[in-house]
């Protein structure tokens, strides 16, 4: 029987759990899940390949009431290699 909040997924080893804790998801993956939590589906392949599509989703995200989603969208809009916090 799955434990509460695991929704049927149990790490099969301590190594997998440690890996998950030490390697958080990339901003793009986090963005996809945060968008899904708001009811907006993101096509990951198209998001990576179509700047217009990505821009529309990022604009939508910046207007969200979700602070985490707005922050993630902001992070994705920073220039590559930017150290700005």
Image: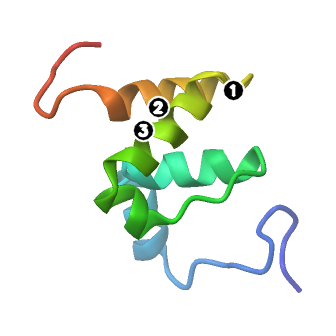
Instruction: Determine crowd level at label 2: few under 14, some 14-19, many 20+ residues with C-alpha closer than 10 A.
Output: many
For numbered disc 2, what is the local secondary structure?
helix
Residue 64, labelled with which disc?
Answer: 1
Is there CB contact under 8 Å for labels 2 and 1?
yes
Vertical arrangement, residue 6 with respect to residue 76, above or below: below
From the top left corner, tell me how far across and down residue 29 is, in percent.
46, 55
Comparing 36 with 60, the one in front is 60
Image coords of residue 76 (percent x, y) = 35, 35
Quarter of the figure with residue 5: bottom right
Residue drawn at point x = 84 percent, y = 80 percent: 2
Q: To which residue does mark 3 refer?
A: 55
Q: How far apart are marks 2 and 1 (CA)?
A: 10 Å
How far apart marks 2 and 3 lie (CA) works out to 10 Å
Please give left or right for residue 12 compared with residue 41 in the image.
left
Are circles 3 and 1 on residues that touch, CB within 8 Å?
Answer: no
Q: Is residue 80 left or right of residue 49?
A: left
**Residue drawn at (16%, 19%) of the image:** 83
Residue at the front extreme, as displayed: 52
Q: Residue at x 10, y 30 (%)?
A: 81
The C terminus, quarter of image: top left
The reply to whether the C-beta atoms of the residues labelled 2 and 3 are less than 8 Å apart is no
Residue pictured at 18% horizontal, 28% vertical: 79
Mark 1 nearby-residue class (10 Å; few <14, some 14–19, many ≥20): some
Q: Earlier in the sequence, mark 2 or mark 1?
A: 1
């Amino acid at each position: 029987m799955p434990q509460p909040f695991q929704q049927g997924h149990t790490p099969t080893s301590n190594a997998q759990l440690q890996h998950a804790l030490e390697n958080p998801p990339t901003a793009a993956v986090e963005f996809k899940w945060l968008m899904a939590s708001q009811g907006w589906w993101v096509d990951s392949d198209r998001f990576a390949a179509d700047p217009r599509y990505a821009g529309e989703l990022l604009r939508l995200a910046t207007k969200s009431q979700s602070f985490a989603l707005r922050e993630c969208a902001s992070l994705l809009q920073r220039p590559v290699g930017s150290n700005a916090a």
